[in-house]
Amino acid sequence: MSPSDPEGRREGSGRLRRTVAVVIAGVALYTLAPALTGVFASWPRLSTLAPLWVAATLLGEVASIACSVGLLRLAVRVGHVRDVAAASLAGAAVTNTVPGGDVVGAGVQFRMLHRAGIDTADAAGGLAVASTLDVAGHFLLPVFALPALGGADVNRDLTDAALLGVGGFAIIALAALVALAYDAPLRVVGRGVEWIVAHVARRRPWSTSLPRRLLEQRDLVRHELGRHWWQAALLVAGHIGFDYASLLAAVHAAGARPNAAAIMVVYSAAAVVALVPITPGGLGVVEASLASLLVLAGVPSTRAVLGTLAYRIGSYWLPIVSGGLAYVDFRRRFPGAPDAPG
């Protein structure tokens, strides 16, 4: 590899990023090892779960995944639903298995959508919109849970977590409104990305008109979601609501009868933790934090651990299996399609 070889520098930079991600994930898992040992040691006790509640847990996850696929299909506006579903499922599987998986999973979704014939601008804009709506929806949950928590006997730390979620939603909502209403912030973002690519990453920009393309994509999204805003709202609510119902069913399967509003705050806080790409799909981090948060919500510790494991079977392992199958089917249907541009 010569010093002036851009492909070699790109490959070396990619290896460095992957190495750093693996090291960070390893350190996080090592730090959480004591808590994780107690959680994973309860796997043999999964046989004590109530079967009907376990079935409800899995059905909730299936419905949540279906709503997520529908949201992405609405956001990209084009493409066959089978192709969009394959990209969504495969991206979720990668997110759950690769360090720094959120970024890598989004890249896999983008490349698969491009292979299926969807324009790069439509794919990128749709992924950004779907992701933003999903994150905003998770932060919005505490807004509904706080009034119900008022008279509940729960730990003060749980109420503080709900207040933090309200603040996060306010920030995301304000940023989204600014991006939809004003051109200047998107121009600044576009120029900033071009500068980073050209000077920091030392690569020639793939586009010299990124600000203009961002504005065009914003206008398309604003137009489409303006007509179908109610569908987007229902799909976001379905994706998050069914996932929350899955957690609630898992806790019931473990034999606990918790306060539903407190579990809503627990779910929201755990979902925010999972957004930080420390380990693949939040593996270990989510288990440890979710079990602790459930205890704060009044669930006995042994039942909290069992409920956490039951929930993660659906939220973590089910997307991996379904995503792998969807990717195999996608490659069978598009064996020689051109790849997406770098």
Image (tube, helix red, strand yellow):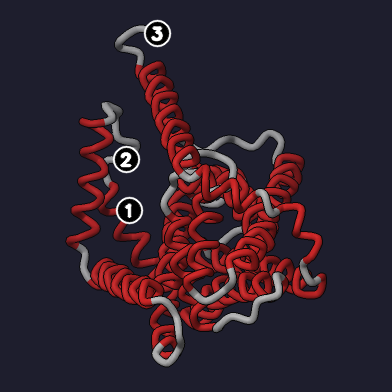
Mark 1 Cα within 10 Å, few/some/many (few <14, many 20+)? some
Q: Earlier in the sequence, mark 3 or mark 1?
A: 3
Which type of secondary structure does the marked residue at label 1 adopt?
A: helix
Between the residue at mark 2 and the residue at mark 3, the CA separation in whole angstroms equals 26 Å
Give the residue at x 19% y 53%: 188
| Residue 88 point in image, percent of width and height | 60, 55
The residue labelled by disc 1 is 213
Pinpoint residue 130: horizontal percent, then vertical percent. 47, 63
Residue drawn at x 54%, y 72% is 240
- Tag 2 near tag 3, CB within 8 Å: no
Q: Nearer the viewer, residue 38 or 244?
A: 38
Provide residue 164's location: percent of width, then percent of height: 32, 71
Q: Earlier in the sequence, mark 2 or mark 3?
A: 3
Q: Is residue 181 left or right of residue 80?
A: left
Query: Which residue: 44% across, 58% down?
Result: 273
Q: Who is closer to the viewer here, 42 or 56?
A: 42
Instruction: Say which residue label 3 marks.
Output: 1
Q: Is residue 109 visible?
A: no
User: In the rendered structure, which disc, 1 or 2, sits on the residue that comes first in sequence?
Assistant: 2
Residue that label 2 marks: 207
Amino acid at dot 3: Met
Q: Find residue 19 and report its image quarter.
A: top left
Q: CA distance from mark 3 to mark 1?
A: 35 Å
Looking at the rendered structure, the kind of residue marked 1 is Arg
